[in-house]
Image (cartoon, grey):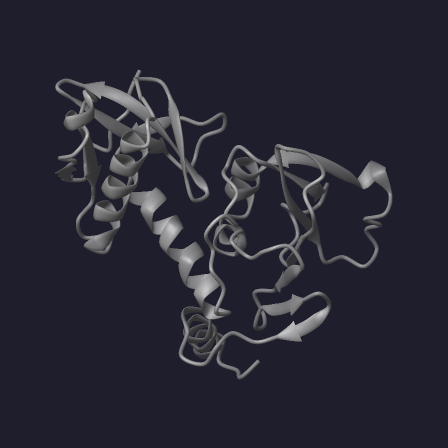
Amino acid sequence: MRHSRAEIEMKSLVSTKCSAFSHPEFRVDFDEDSILEHEPEFLIRMLEIKVQQGSIFSAGQTIEVGLSVLRVAADEPYLSLDEPDMRSFPIVFVTGVTQSLILLRHQHFVSGSFALDSEGEIPSFLKGALVCTNYAESPAFFMDRLEPMRGNDSGWFIGCCAGTHDHNDPRNLTRVSLYAAFLALPEMHQYVSLPVGYSVIIDPTRDPVFQQNGRRILPKPNSFLSERMELARKKRGNGA
């Protein structure tokens, strides 16, 4: 069963190059007021390239786009895409790709804030993460990306910042999907594009602290992250 966001008027964009390969064209639906003009065009182009390279899509299949996972739906004569509602667990899919494109934008912007190329670094919601058992309740948390331990592992460790919680004790650790981690800590989504060796401490009372292989680093001046950090400082009313 498909769910819709009936309260939002969607705009649609249709691919044009898939039918040349005897494949249905794609239609993507999105909230025009929430995304940048090139974002649905990027998604359409990505789908067209996949079809040109031999991929065949049908209803019920999933496609990983950045962190998000899109599900193919049959909307004759097209194939359309649904995205997670970003609220429910297990995943409930709803019409459109708006939230997925916004997540992807943030991930690219964060990578760009450190002059990094996020291509190939963004794990999907379906990948796993190692977390401490208190991560979702802690007002401050940290993320540390290590080498993945297995094929479905993102490499991310997410833990609380409580000094009394021993993260070396296996009893204090568990594994969750990145989607479950996102539902518990929505802010974490923008940092998942950072590569192995990067870490970040998120504390709502101060600036995020970024490290690369244990060395503190700062976002580029006038970048997405530096501007967001400056705005957060003004809201807190301090310079930290």
The residue lying at 39 percent from left, 49 percent from top is 103
Relative height, residue 126 to residue 216 (above, below): above
Relative height, residue 211 to residue 181 (above, below): below
**What is the tally of numbered marks visible in this picture?**
0
Foreground residue, 11 or 92? 11
Q: Is residue 34 visible?
A: no
Which quadrant would residue 36 be assigned to in this image?
Answer: bottom left
Q: Is residue 54 left or right of residue 37?
A: right
The residue lying at 44 percent from left, 79 percent from top is 234
Q: Is residue 203 visible?
A: yes
The residue lying at 34 percent from left, 50 percent from top is 102
Foreground residue, 118 or 164? 118
Relative height, residue 208 to residue 137 (above, below): below
Q: Is residue 109 left or right of residue 75?
A: right
Indicate the position of residue 86 as horizontal and vertical percent values: 41, 38
Q: Is residue 90 left or right of residue 95?
A: right
Which quadrant would residue 28 be assigned to in this image?
Answer: top left
Indicate the position of residue 98 as horizontal and vertical percent values: 28, 43
